[in-house]
Structure formats: structure tokens, C-alpha cells
């Protein structure tokens, strides 16, 4: 991911390579600049619509914490469980990420209090006010901590997803952590390096059809104030964007640019994918593998027919749970990385003689993104559709205190939807597989004289994963 | 700067709404009477002590925090309601007599299901001036904990209809309701066997006569009531067919098993009584069974039902228990 503090082209990449990349990017066709649409521009230019949305999500967030801590102990009747893990988590995976990348980040309530403290305001970004404003330590950069946070979620998922009080405490802890870190570290350090949802959204944002990019590079180079960088709450410099993984789509750079040289582009799906990676960092590859391992595990625990697995995942601290935790960690930390690395190594060995394994892994890991995204969507469809009626029922009685806000006594269950659900899941998984195959082809034709050989092992890995998901979800 | 303050105002307003709604709701919640149900192992009813006044309606909101429970009040003619996890069930109770009432769970929620009981203290003008009649087993001075075994048992299940077909003269005293309540089936069989006029009958035929006399003390409606009470309250341990093999029987008897439940009970539970065992049942009188039901098994795991069933309900239940020994049908 590209952050100002770690822009590789500033540090390492030779100037002529940068030039080529930027030129390629600018010439890429198929973009529609949404910021130039007359009806949309005022909605983005004014901070009010976004602020109102953030206030709404902030209120909802605080309300959710209150309901989680004080409402019904029964998960299926508690607003916190249903809204966080059914409504929001589903919306994130089915709408926000696939169609908007990190669009959730632009209205996420969690950093709002921290922003207020740091900048001394919520509407007008002012000067730095409170906090130590430290740089995030270099050794903790990248998405390693986010992968760890996601693994942690996986270990306790069965409890967090069913117990309203645990959900309440987790949300409160995240809120406190984000606020606390904003007083120690500069800008959006929590969002960038810690937030597991940020890691999740950022990675899959590379498949999404939305991007913020500069229009004319020369205009930026000649502009010595760099208002966009000054304005960015994340500390990013848009000229350096190589993909959409780091940009939180807050639109501050578009508002700040005096030359109107920034664009909010609609682009084809998966545009960021298939480029040879210049860096040899493995954190993103590892995060992508953790997402695959997690979705397989969640599908097995929540959708699978194994009661013992469910209770093992649920009884945190018990011996069966330790077994579950070990299996989950071995799968994510050893098994999946080993298989994937072996696949990449085999492919490279078959097609070229000299290669950097790290760089090859980091490049090939891009094929895991469409695969993982579609697997998450398919899992969500199978997990959520039968529970959608609960969303209405907790709106009617959020605390489980017998309220009748909507005047509904009986909420009909939607069982009939299950029939479509299975074929929909198969379709989604197949789309994920073929999409990842096409990314793999794109990489191999650029990279090798014998593209098929480079391709095969990684495609086999993808096929194996897809079959496993098919078996777990519909098999 | 005006805009900044407006924006801050909106943020604070949003937060205020998010905090005020739950607070107001919580306050209103505290005003109403909400009763939470948990399995006995995790606390039972909360609160478990309620007060009410004669004639004044008591509104309760019932909810469960774990599994589905039921709610009913003993000695009160009010249908039981289900208490569903996460949902509120509204109940209104009206008491016309003062006293202590027991409310209890009517769903087999766990092995200690029957321990889910609470008290409603109903106060009123004519408090406790009614004389309480002691139950029959007390009047008779029965030791309901003593061991008892039938000295004789029938070869096959006695049938009242076969006894009726024999069409024999039986002394009036045996038809008496008082006789039935205080005597055991073996007592009656021995008495009939010693009647010279019945000398020509086989032992089994005397058993059939005995069942015929026993049946005359009940009605099909009473048996129906007894069966309903048995299914709802007794079958969990004693089994639907009375053999002492209900769904919780194994857990009650397993001395190595559920240590948590024993930790709560503080007692060693026993296997539930087997009503299909003739040596046990035929040496038991209706008064004895009544005593067991209303007093409970004293440390055996058998709950006391005196606070819950009315006297008529107990007798209906006793009548039904005999169907595990005798064919009580009018016709084959």
C-alpha cells in the first residue's frame, strides 16, 4: 500500500521506472471522472453531506455499544449483534467494498473523535491541536498488525458474533484505541496500520471500480504547496498512488486542489490488479492469505454441519477451543502460505531461471484478491440471507425490551430465499475463480516467455481453494 | 468558524440522541415489572419474589435470557405462557385470595427445570384466616418414605373391563371412595381373595375385579386431566409411559455425571420412580401417592408440587398413575 511515509518510488524506484508507471496510468482508458458530473460535484465539494453521514454512523455506533452492553443477552434479538454482524458486515462486503473500495472509511465514525482532537475541529480541518503527533514506528508499518488483528478476530469470532456484550466491549475498545492512538501518533495511524477492517477494505479496494487519482502530473509537479498532501487526513500524496489500497476516499484532496487536478474516477473492476509489483514486501500477500484462511474457517464453523467445531470455537479457553485456535493459526500462518509459496516457486522455476521469490510472491498474491473477495461475498450470502428478517425485528425492538417501534408483532421468516442462495453462491465462487485466473494470465504474459507454465501452479491453488469453498458452502 | 460550531453542534446532538434513547428506554424499563428467566443452573427467575394485592392486576413482562421457558402460577386458573429468548411476553395476573403463590417454569429447560420457581406474596384484607386442612397422608399418619413391596402381583396387567364382565357381587365397603384413598391395590386384592363368595375365581380374575373397583373411583375426564398434568410436569423425568425413563432421568441418576447440577442441589438424586413396576405401585395407596406429589421426594430429586397443583389436580394425577398398572378402559 502506498503511504507518504513509505512511498517506494521516492525511496527506491529509479526515476525512469516511475515515469513509465505514471504514464501508463494516465493513459489507461475507461475512466469517468465523477467529480466533473454537475449534479454530483456539489455533494462531494461540500463537507456537509459527508459530515451528516458520519454523524449518523457515529450516533449509530454509540447507540450500538449501548445496546450491546445493556440490551437483551440474546444475540438474535439484540440490535448490536444484528446491526454489526448482519447488516453492516454484509453491506460492507456486498456493497461498500465491491462497488466503492474503501468508501466505508469515508463515513466511518471511529476516527471522528480522534480527528476532532488532532485537528481542533470537525468541519474545517485546522492546525494540529492535541497529541504528540509522532510518526508511526517504521518496524510496525505495512499490514502485518492488521493481519494479526484479523487473526485475533477469527480466534474469538464465534463468541463475538453471538454475544451482544462481547460485541459492545469490542466496539468500545476499538473506539478507545482509535482515540488514544490519535493522541500519540500522527494522522490516521490507527486506520492505516491497525484497523482490521481498514486492512480488509484496503486490500479488496484494488478490485473496486472507484479511485482517486491526479489528472495531469505536470500540474502537480509544478505546484509547490502540495495542498492535497496538506489536506489529506491520512498523510497520503495522491501523485504517488499506484493502487487504491491506502486512499480512504475522504475527498479532502479534491476539495483542496487549487487547479482542480484531482479526479474521482469510475473505472473497470480490478484495474489495479495484474501489474508486476516493484516492491518485494510480503505483508500484503500475507494479509491476502489470512483472508482466504479466515473465510474457509468461518464457512466451516458457521455454515458447516459440525456441531463439535461450533462448540469448540465457542468455548473460549477450553481445551477444544485451544485445538480450534491452533488449527486456525496453523492453517493461516503455515499451511496456506506454504502451499501458495510452493505454487509460486514451482511456477517461477518452470518458466524462468532467475527470479526473486519475494517479488514473485508479492506479484502473484494479486490473484488472491478477486478469489478472496468473491469467497467472502459467497460466504456472506449463505450466512446472512436466512437472517435478514432479524434486521427488521431488531429495528422494531433494538434492546429486546419489548418495544414496538415499527408496530410489528410477528416477523415472517424468509425461508424461500434459500433456494436461490445456493446457486448464487456457486456463481459467485466461479466468478471469483475465473477472475483470478484472468489476473494470473495478465501477470504471466507480462512476466514470462512461457506464461502457461508460470500460470499453472497458482491456478491450481485457486482451483483447490474454490473447490474447498464450494464444498463448505453448498456441497 | 460559524460552520465549525454548527458542525460540532450536530455531532454533539447526534451523540446525545444516541445516549438519551437508551437511557430513557432503560428508565421506562425499570418502571415496569420485567421478570428474566434463566435456567436454574444460572439463577432461575430474576426477580424470584414478587408482591401483589388481592384484586389489583399484576402486570408482568417476561423474557428469557437463554432458552425457551414457560410461566404459570400454581393454584391459579391461568393458562401457561411461553417465555421466549429475547422477546417480551406480557402477562396480567389477578388474585382473589391472599397468600403465597408459586410461579414456575412449564418448559423442560434443563435437568433442574423444576427448580425454576418463584414466589408471589399476595396481601389482602382477609389474610390467612382460612383454616388449612392437612392433606390426607398426614391425617392417616402415613410414613411415605418407608420401604414397601407388594406381597403378590398379577401375572398380566389387570383390566377393569374384564372385571366388569365377571359381574360379581362385591361388598359395598370396597366401593367406598374413602376406602380407595387409604388402601393399596394389594390390600383390596387380599380382601377380595378372602371373600368366600369369590372362591371360584382365579387369582388373575380377582385382580381384574380389583381393577374394576379401582376404576369406579375416577372418570374419563379426570384421567384426561391427569394425563395432561403428567405430560407437562412429570414425564420429563418419569417418562411418557411412566417407566422412570424420561429425558432427564439419565442425568438425575448418573452419579458421576453432571457435577454442576449436583453442586446446586446439594443432594444425591435418584432414578425417578418407575410407575410400571407392580411390586412398588401395587403396595401404594392413593393417599401415599398424594403425599409424594405434594411433599416431594425429600432429597431424591423429586420436586414438591403442593404449592402448584390444586387438590383436585393431584387426585387427577394419582388416578392417571394407576393406568400404568391397570387397563382402565371401559371396553377392550
Image (cartoon, coloured by chain):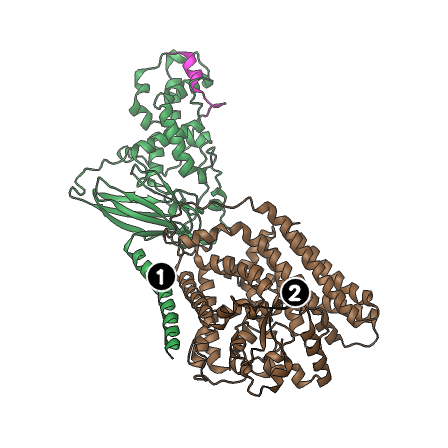
Q: Which chain is brown?
A: A
Q: Secondary structure at mark 1?
A: helix
What is the x, y in percent for residue A205? 61, 68
Q: Position of residue B155 (x, y in %)?
A: 50, 23
Where B13 falls versus B106 (above or below)?
A: below
Asked whether B276 falls inside the magenta stretch, the response is no
Residue at (19, 37) in percent of width and height: B131
User: Which is nearer the eye, A139 or B325?
Assistant: A139
Q: Quadrant of residue A151?
A: bottom right
| Residue bearing mark 2 | A268
Q: Position of residue A55 (x, y in %)?
A: 42, 68
> Within 10 angstroms of label 2, few (less than 14), some, or many (20 or more) residues?
some
Mark 2 belongs to chain? A
Tell me, by letter, which chain the rendering colours green: B
Q: Quadrant of residue A352?
A: bottom right
**Chain ID, mark 1:** B
Residue at x-position 57% and y-position 65%? A100
- Placement of the N terminus of chain A among the 4 image quadrants: bottom right
Question: Residue at 43% of width from left, 19% of height from top?
Answer: B208
**Residue picked out by circle 1:** B22
Magenta run includes residue B160: yes
Q: Is residue A315 visible?
A: no
Nearer the observer: mark 2 or 1; the answer is: 2
Tell me the distance, in whole angstroms, between the alpha carbons under discs 2 and 1.
44 Å
Amino acid at each position: 500500500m502506498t503511504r507518504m511515509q513509505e512511498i517506494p518510488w521516492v525511496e527506491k524506484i529509479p526515476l525512469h521506472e516511475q515515469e513509465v508507471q505514471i504514464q501508463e496510468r494516465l493513459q489507461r482508458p475507461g475512466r469517468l471522472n465523477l467529480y466533473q458530473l454537475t449534479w454530483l460535484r456539489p455533494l462531494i465539494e461540500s463537507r456537509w453531506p459527508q459530515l451528516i453521514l458520519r454523524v449518523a454512523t457515529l450516533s449509530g455506533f454509540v447507540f450500538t455499544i449501548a445496546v450491546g452492553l445493556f440490551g437483551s443477552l440474546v444475540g438474535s434479538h439484540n440490535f448490536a449483534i444484528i446491526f454489526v454482524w448482519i447488516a453492516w458486515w454484509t453491506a460492507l462486503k456486498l456493497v461498500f467494498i465491491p462497488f466503492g473500495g474503501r468508501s466505508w472509511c469515508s463515513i466511518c465514525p471511529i476516527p471522528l473523535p480522534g480527528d476532532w482532537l488532532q485537528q481542533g475541529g470537525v468541519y474545517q480541518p485546522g492546525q494540529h491541536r492535541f497529541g504528540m503527533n509522532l510518526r508511526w514506528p517504521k518496524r510496525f508499518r505495512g499490514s502485518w498488525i492488521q493481519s494479526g488483528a484479523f487473526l485475533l478476530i477469527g480466534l474469538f469470532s464465534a463468541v463475538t458474533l453471538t454475544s451482544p456484550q462481547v460485541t459492545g466491549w469490542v466496539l468500545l475498545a476499538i473506539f478507545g484505541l482509535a482515540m488514544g492512538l490519535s493522541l500519540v501518533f500522527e494522522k490516521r495511524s490507527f486506520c492505516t496500520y491497525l484497523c482490521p477492517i481498514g486492512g480488509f477494505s484496503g486490500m479488496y479496494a484494488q478490485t473496486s471500480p472507484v479511485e482517486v487519482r491526479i489528472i495531469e502530473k505536470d500540474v502537480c509537479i509544478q505546484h509547490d504547496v502540495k495542498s492535497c498532501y496538506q489536506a489529506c487526513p491520512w498523510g497520503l500524496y495522491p501523485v504517488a498512488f499506484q493502487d487504491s489500497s491506502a486512499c480512504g476516499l475522504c475527498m479532502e484532496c479534491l476539495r483542496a486542489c487549487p487547479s482542480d487536478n484531482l479526479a474521482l474516477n469510475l473505472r473497470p473492476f480490478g484495474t489495479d490488479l495484474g501489474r508486476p509489483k516493484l516492491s518485494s514486501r510480503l505483508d500484503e500477500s500475507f494479509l491476502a492469505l489470512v483472508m482466504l484462511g479466515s473465510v474457509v474457517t468461518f464457512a466451516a464453523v458457521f455454515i458447516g454441519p459440525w456441531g463439535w467445531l461450533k462448540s469448540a470455537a465457542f468455548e473460549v479457553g477450553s481445551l477444544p477451543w485451544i485445538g480450534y485456535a491452533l488449527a486456525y493459526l496453523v492453517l493461516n500462518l503455515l499451511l496456506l502460505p506454504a502451499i501458495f509459496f510452493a505454487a509460486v516457486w514451482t511456477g517461477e522455476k518452470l518458466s524462468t531461471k532467475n527470479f526473486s521469490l519475494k517479488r514473485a510472491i508479492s506479484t502473484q498474491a494479486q490473484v488472491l484478491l478477486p478469489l478472496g473477495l468473491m469467497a467472502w461475498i459467497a460466504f456472506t450470502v449463505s450466512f446472512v440471507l436466512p437472517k435478514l428478517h432479524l434486521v427488521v425485528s431488531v429495528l422494531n425492538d433494538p434492546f429486546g425490551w419489548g418495544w414496538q417501534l415499527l408496530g410489528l408483532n410477528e416477523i415472517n421468516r424468509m425461508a424461500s430465499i434459500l433456494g436461490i442462495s445456493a446457486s448464487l453462491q456457486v456463481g459467485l465462487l466461479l466468478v471469483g475463480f475465473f477472475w483470478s485466473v484472468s489476473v494470473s494470465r495478465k501477470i504471466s504474459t507480462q512476466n514470462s516467455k512461457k506464461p502457461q507454465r508460470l500460470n499453472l501452479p497458482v491456478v491450481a491453488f485457486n482451483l483447490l481453494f474454490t473447490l474447498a469453498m464450494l464444498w463448505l458452502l453448498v456441497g | 468558524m460559524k460552520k465549525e460550531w454548527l458542525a460540532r453542534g450536530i455531532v454533539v446532538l447526534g451523540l446525545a440522541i444516541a445516549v438519551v434513547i437508551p437511557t430513557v428506554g432503560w428508565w421506562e424499563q425499570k418502571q415496569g415489572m420485567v421478570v428474566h428467566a434463566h435456567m436454574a443452573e444460572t439463577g432461575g427467575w430474576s426477580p424470584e419474589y414478587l408482591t401483589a394485592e388481592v384484586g389489583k392486576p399484576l402486570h408482568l413482562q417476561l423474557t428469557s435470557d437463554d432458552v425457551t421457558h414457560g410461566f404459570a402460577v400454581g393454584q391459579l386458573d391461568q393458562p401457561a405462557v411461553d417465555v421466549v429468548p429475547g422477546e417480551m411476553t406480557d402477562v396480567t395476573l389477578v388474585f382473589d385470595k391472599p397468600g403465597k403463590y408459586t410461579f414456575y417454569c412449564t418448559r423442560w429447560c434443563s435437568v433442574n427445570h423444576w427448580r425454576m420457581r418463584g414466589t408471589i406474596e399476595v396481601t389482602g384484607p382477609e389474610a390467612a384466616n382460612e383454616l388449612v386442612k392437612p392433606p390426607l397422608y398426614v391425617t392417616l399418619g402415613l410414613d411415605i418414605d418407608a420401604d414397601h413391596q407388594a406381597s403378590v402381583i398379577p401375572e398380566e396387567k389387570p383390566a377393569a373391563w374384564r372385571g366388569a364382565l365377571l359381574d360379581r357381587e362385591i361388598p359395598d365397603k370396597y366401593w367406598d371412595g374413602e376406602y380407595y384413598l387409604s388402601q393399596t391395590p394389594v390390600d383390596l386384592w387380599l380382601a377380595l381373595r378372602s371373600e368366600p363368595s369369590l372362591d371360584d375365581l382365579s387369582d388373575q380374575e380377582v385382580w381384574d375385579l380389583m381393577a374394576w373397583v379401582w376404576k369406579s373411583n375416577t372418570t374419563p375426564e379426570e384421567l384426561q386431566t391427569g394425563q395432561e398434568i403428567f405430560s407437562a410436569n412429570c414425564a420429563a423425568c418419569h417418562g411418557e409411559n411412566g417407566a422412570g425413563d424420561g429425558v432427564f432421568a439419565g442425568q438425575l441418576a448418573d452419579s458421576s455425571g453432571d457435577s454442576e447440577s449436583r453442586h446446586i442441589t446439594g443432594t444425591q438424586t435418584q432414578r425417578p420412580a418407575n410407575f410400571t413396576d407392580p411390586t412398588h405401585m401395587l403396595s401404594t395407596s392413593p393417599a401415599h401417592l398424594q403425599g409424594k406429589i405434594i411433599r416431594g421426594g425429600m432429597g431424591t430429586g423429586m420436586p414438591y408440587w403442593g404449592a402448584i397443583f390444586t387438590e383436585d389436580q393431584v387426585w387427577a394425577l394419582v388416578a392417571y398413575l394407576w393406568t400404568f398398572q391397570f387397563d382402565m378402559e371401559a371396553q377392550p
